Amino acid sequence: MSHREVLEALSGLLLALFVAMLSSTIVTNALPRIVADLEGTQSGYTWVVVATLLTMTASTPIWGKLADLFNKKLLVQLALVVYSAGSLAAAFAPGMAWLIGARAVQGLGVGGLTALVQVVIASMVSPRERGRYSGYIGAVFALATVSGPLLGGLIVDSSLGWRGCFFVGLPVAVLAFAVLQKTLHLPTVRRAATIDYAGAVLIVGGVSVLLVWVSLAGHQFEWASVTTAWMVVLGVLLLVAAVVNEMKAPEPIVPLRLFRDRTTSLATFASVMVGVAMFGSTVYLSQYFQIAHGMSPTHAGLMSIAMVGGLLVSSIVTGRVISSTGRWKKFLVGGMVLVVAGLAMLSTIDDRTDLLRVGAFMAVLGLGLGATMQNLVLAVQNNTAQRDMGAASAVVAFFRSMGGSIGVSALGAALSNRVVDDVTAGLARIGIDPAAQGGGSDRVPDLARLPAPVRAVFESAFGDATGHVFLLAVPCAAIALVAVLFIREVPLRTTIERQDELDRAGAAGAPAPIARQQD
């Protein structure tokens, strides 16, 4: 495919990716209003996010495996349909349980879109050339991350209310569907295969049980209790069974042979830690701005520009340089150093921290994430045979999403517990019965209805708790940095197929694929 043909096909893929990213970012600033309107709790706030991440995590490797077997364009279009159905259900949600279920359906579609876009791009261009296109992916990610909170804030503050946030992505999904139909034309390599449904059920079951345990422990039951014991044992047993199943399955969801490669193993482990640190901490920034600083959803959305601006610049610049040099490890290492530094800086914030300083800390984190996320996928794809490209790309996305699910759930529980303790102590300190004002409960308050002294207590509690969450995320990022340091750099290949695949094709008398050079 020529550069122009790649860009034409990429246009529909980028629209689909924009829809996937928008689904999470546009709701970010609306969540405090949604949860307050539906009379939800802090645990409900967390699970509106976790439900999407969980189904996205569970479905990602399935989508990736399907991409190795069936028509990739039809799969992307199917993911768009699933996403749209979930969005419509969420828009009409009468309560928190319905909303969480609808977000779970959305996550199924988002899992397909995030995994399949990477797979399709890997089918069109070589790893060496992929860097120049990763800049476009970074730009779309940045655009969705900036416009999402802004659109969400504007919609929530308008007459449409928060339900409008779930309608706004539907026209883009329809446009993406149509553009893909016109521009994306890929050959379908069909072969006899079976889908590992047992592996998918065991993986999602094990992860779900452990996430439910982390989210509810300390509220619904004690950390040290019989309920904790059986949930942990059940979750671990399901995951052990999943590993055993993957070792025996003819077409495993997560092919364990991929982890024989050192780069794949370390990059996947780093992706888990990045997911915990990134998703687990940044998802609560909007709540911090709206509760600790009393901002409107629109103003909270504007604050995200600092982090996304850094991410945009970093992803475009590193992508271009990597394509021209074929070298990528120094950008991974430098990016992880900035991620650790940014999280450490953000761990010092509270309700009194100057907003300019918070924005600078967010920009540092954004610079690090922009140099890290896409390049972890690129490192794995460069070492992977084309026949496993879908599974390998999905494995990285799967473990990053799983890390995000764990991070949002675990750090959300930590934030909730810290807020409850601080609010209870703060209200008692000013002579107010904590039970009368929601102290001891994790219900998200509507600050506009609270008296000034009580509002100050909640602002202080959410400010301190948010800094505490970032502090908990720092060790995860540091562990990811160590993993990245041990990755062995392999120069990016200039062919779609790996060298051993080309050698086998030559020995069999098949015409070797032409390595397309950069234009």
Image (cartoon, rainbow, N blue to C red):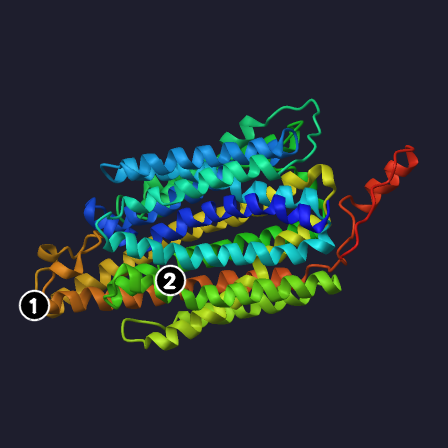
| Residue shown at the point (69%, 63%) measured from the top left | 322
Where is residue 45 shown, x and y percent of the image? 30, 49
**Residue 284 sits in which quadrant?**
bottom left
Residue 237 can be seen, yes or no: no
**Residue 286 sits in which quadrant?**
bottom left
Where is residue 13 shown, x and y percent of the image? 56, 44
Mark 2 is on which residue type? Val
Q: How many marks?
A: 2
Label 2 to label 1, Cα distance in Å? 28 Å
Q: Provide the residue designation for mark 2.
A: 469
Mark 1 is on which residue type? Gly
Decide if residue 70 is on the left or right side of residue 159. Answer: right
Residue 23 can be seen, yes or no: yes
Which numbered disc, 2 or 1, marks the residue closer to the eye? 2
Label 2 Cα crowd, 10 Å radius (few <14 / some 14-19 / many 20+) = many
Q: Provide the residue designation for mark 1.
A: 431
| Residue shown at the point (12%, 69%) measured from the top left | 453
Indicate which disc, 2 or 1, sits on the residue closer to the N terminus: 1
The relative height of residue 336 versus residue 514 in the rendered view (above or below) is: below
Q: Indicate the secondary structure of the residue bearing disc 1.
A: loop
Label 1 Cα crowd, 10 Å radius (few <14 / some 14-19 / many 20+) = few
- Name the foreground residue: 294 vs 518: 518
| Residue shown at the point (68%, 53%) measured from the top left | 130
- The quadrant of the rendering that contains the C terminus is bottom right
